[in-house]
Image (cartoon, rainbow, N blue to C red):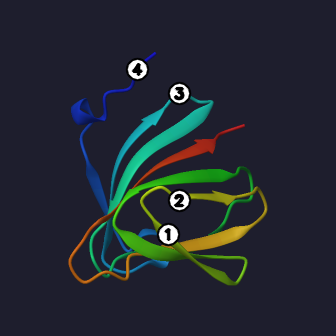
């Protein structure tokens, strides 16, 4: 199966999970997994949240920024993979002034 994200409408969610600015995403869900192509504009963030029922794997494809996972600040950029295990907390910040932070993410839904 292929997923063509260019055929999925991008949605913009302001202040996602209490973050700054907005989170733009194209999402595919099948009840088993949520697969997302995400984008944070410069200065945007996804607020701190805990993955109570699932984990999350984020593959960074462009830009730079940082995650804070369980209190530890970790830089991210294209080529880096961030893993937030089930039961752990993280936030994502694009601290750039001129470049979107882009990533693909997978969240198992079971």
Residue 70 placement, left or right of 7: right
Q: Residues within 10 Å of mark 2 (few under 14, many from 20)?
A: some
Q: Residues within 10 Å of mark 4 (few under 14, many from 20)?
A: few
Q: Nearer the viewer, mark 3 or mark 2?
A: 2
Q: Residues within 10 Å of mark 1 (few under 14, many from 20)?
A: many
Residue 19 placement, left or right of 34: left
Q: Which residue is mark 3?
A: 30
Q: Residues within 10 Å of mark 3 (few under 14, many from 20)?
A: few
Q: Which residue is mark 1?
A: 76
The quadrant the C terminus occupies is top right
Disc on the earlier residue, 3 or 2:
3
Q: Is residue 6 above or below residue 15?
A: above
SS state under label 3 = loop
Q: Which residue is mark 2?
A: 80
Disc on the earlier residue, 4 or 1:
4
Q: Is residue 8 above or below residue 1?
A: below
Q: Gap between marks 4 and 1, in whole Å?
A: 27 Å
Q: Are marks 4 and 2 in contact (CB under 8 Å)?
A: no
Q: Gap between marks 3 and 4, in whole Å?
A: 13 Å
Disc on the earlier residue, 4 or 2:
4
Residue at 34%, 52% in the rendered image: 25
Q: Gap between marks 1 and 3, in whole Å?
A: 28 Å
């Amino acid at each position: 199966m292929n997923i063509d994200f260019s055929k999925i409408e991008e949605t913009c969610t302001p202040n996602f999970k209490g973050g700054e600015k907005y989170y733009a995403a194209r999402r595919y869900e099948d009840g088993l997994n949520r697969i997302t192509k995400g984008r944070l504009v410069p200065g945007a963030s996804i607020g701190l949240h805990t993955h109570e029922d699932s984990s999350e794997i984020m593959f960074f494809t462009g830009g730079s920024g940082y995650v804070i996972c369980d209190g530890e600040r970790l830089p991210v950029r294209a080529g880096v993979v961030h893993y937030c295990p089930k039961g752990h907390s993280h936030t994502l910040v694009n601290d750039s002034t001129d470049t979107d932070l882009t990533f693909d993410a997978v969240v198992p839904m079971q």
